[in-house]
Image: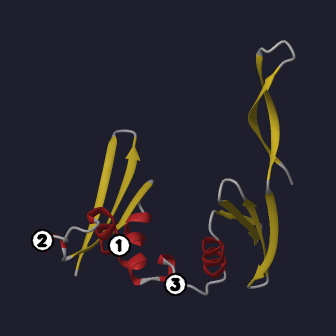
Amino acid sequence: IAVYEPKTVEYILPDGTQSKEVIAVAQNVSKKESQFMNTDIFELELGEEDLDITYAVTDKVAIISTHLSGIENAILTSQEKLPTILNSQTYENLIVPVLSSSDELTYFNFEKLFPILMGDKKIPNYLKPLFAFSSGKNYFNDGIVNINYLSIK
């Protein structure tokens, strides 16, 4: 496997003038193979970029990630070895009611979202009781219906 990137090389010609030439230089790419839960995993390491591209195919679905852990989690989830929202009480309580009558669905898990948004700042007390929010839109010829569910702990 070779990936080429342009590189400019400067030359001094016999008459003393400077010249530049753009040439293709092969980048160091190495390929590793491993196995996880009976699934073959392939990892391409792009040496100069310090970037890995990892991929696998399971159940006719391609999984691509820049981290091996992302591939492993996707494999575990596909084999139902990790809990997912699909088999949770949250799915039953907040998503199924909206999904059954919606063309569009939005779901936010505030327990996970707020720390990401707030960073190092303290989460205000008035936001702490909020657990999750789901919303669905149903489009009709004569208008739009919006259904919202807010889960409070």
- The 10 Å Cα crowd at callout 2, few under 14, some 14 to 19, many 20 or more, is few
Between marks 2 and 1, how big is the CA–CA gap?
16 Å
Q: Where is residue 92 in the image (x, y as percent from the top left)?
A: 41, 78
Which residue does the numbered mark 2 point to in the structure image?
126
Q: Which amino acid does label 1 sit on?
A: Lys
The residue carrying pointer 3 sits among few (fewer than 14), some (14 to 19) or many (20 or more) residues within 10 Å by Cα, namely few
Q: Name the residue under label 1.
A: 112
Residue 102 in percent (x, y) is at 42, 57
Q: Which of label 3 and label 2 is nearer to you?
A: 2
Decide if residue 50 is on the left or right side of residue 93.
right
Q: Looking at the image, which residue is at 75% across and 36% down? A: 6
> In x, y percent, where is residue 49?
66, 53
Earlier-in-chain disc, 2 versus 1 = 1
Check residue 83 in the rendering and tell me which mark sits there, or answer none: 3
Q: Residues within 10 Å of mark 1 (few under 14, many from 20)?
A: few
Q: What residue type is labelled 2?
A: Tyr
Q: Residue 11 carries which label?
A: none
Q: In which quarter of the image is the C terminus?
A: bottom left
Q: Residue at x 60, y 77 (%)?
A: 73
3 and 2 marks in contact (CB < 8 Å) = no
